Image (spheres, rainbow, N blue to C red):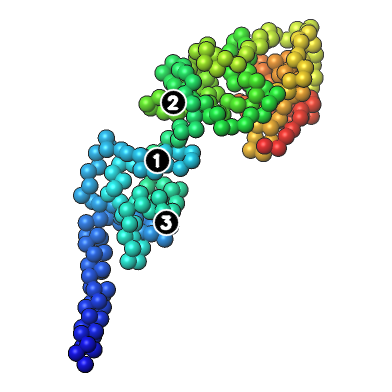
Amino acid sequence: MRKLIISLITGTVILLGILFIKPMVVDSVEYKYDEVGFVGDYLLYVDKTADTDADNVERFYQDDDYDYYLTNSQSYLLIKDEEIIELKKGLEENKIDINDLRNVLTDISVKTNLSKYDKIGKAGKYDIYKDNTVLLFAQALELIYVDTEYYYYLPSISSYIYLLVNEDEEIDLKTALKDGKINIADVRKVITNIYAVERNDLSVDSKYQRLGVVGDYVLYKDTTYSVFPQMIEVIYEDSLYVYYLPTLSSSIYLLVNDSEQLGLIEALEQGKINIADLQKVIKIYVNNK
């Protein structure tokens, strides 16, 4: 009988703990913490007394592609039923997904995980990194920049493997060149397989043959200009396909209307002409991405 009484008392204590002690813990969390929102099956809370100093930013998570930064990540808790875990632990144990978290915490900053990149040099205020894990599409030229004198090409579709980084930003190679963030001469000192092809004289004279109309432009071809055989040239990409010429020859084409003259790739990149209209006038090859 005495053992039965002790068992009943012990069971009562445990039941009281379940009914009152754990709710008290959750209540204390809710008292000190503000509710942020749901992340998957968990409710996210932030410590309202935590230091919000913007200088206290830390990397709190990393996946194969990116590093994620947040101010005082340790001030966040995840709660589901009776389970209470820290934010970092929830990510590390795959309790929540980083993309779901970013939908709730919009102040998370993201940087490229450079562990698979090699630093290969510097251009202006930027360090140039190269992803050496990528297999390249050989024998397909990529135009990366145009100035008043030359077209600049990489020998393969590979501009996306380069990343330019400084303290303020990360930017891809073509965008950095286009926006004037870096100088093509500085880049060619680091990426030495970039080569230049001289531009045509942008005046329509007897050396040009009229091919047809492309949108609001007339397309001309320079009949005197030599092309590079057996080297295909990518001229345009959309979400599904890569469009290319069978030779290095985009520079022999000129688009003209009453107000301007444009090179072929310039016109495509600026949306001045449509690739479908262009395909009606000249032979263009297409590959799935």
| Kind of residue sitting beneath label 1 | Tyr
Q: Position of residue 52 (x, y in %)?
A: 25, 42
How many angstroms separate mark 1 from mark 2 (CA)?
Answer: 16 Å
Mark 2 crowd level (few <14, some 14–19, many ≥20, 10 Å Cα): many
Q: Position of residue 215 (x, y in %)?
A: 72, 27
Classify mark 1: helix, strand or loop: strand
Sequence-wise, which precedes: disc 1 or disc 2? 1
Mark number, residue 165: 2
Picture quadrant of residue 60: top left
| Kind of residue sitting beneath label 3 | Lys
How many numbered marks have been drawn onto this rendered protein structure? Answer: 3
| Kind of residue sitting beneath label 2 | Val
Mark 1 crowd level (few <14, some 14–19, many ≥20, 10 Å Cα): some
Classify mark 3: helix, strand or loop: loop
The answer to whether residue 181 is left or right of residue 149 is left
Q: Which residue is mark 3?
A: 95
**Could you tell me if residue 190 is visible in this image?**
yes
Classify mark 2: helix, strand or loop: strand
Q: Residue at x 53, y 29 (%)?
A: 131
Return the residue nearer the eye: 182 or 98: 98
Picture quadrant of residue 214: top right
Q: Residue at x 70, y 24 (%)?
A: 139
Q: Which residue is mark 1?
A: 68
How many angstroms separate mark 2 from mark 3 (CA)?
Answer: 32 Å
Whether residue 57 is situated above or below residue 75 in the rendered picture: above
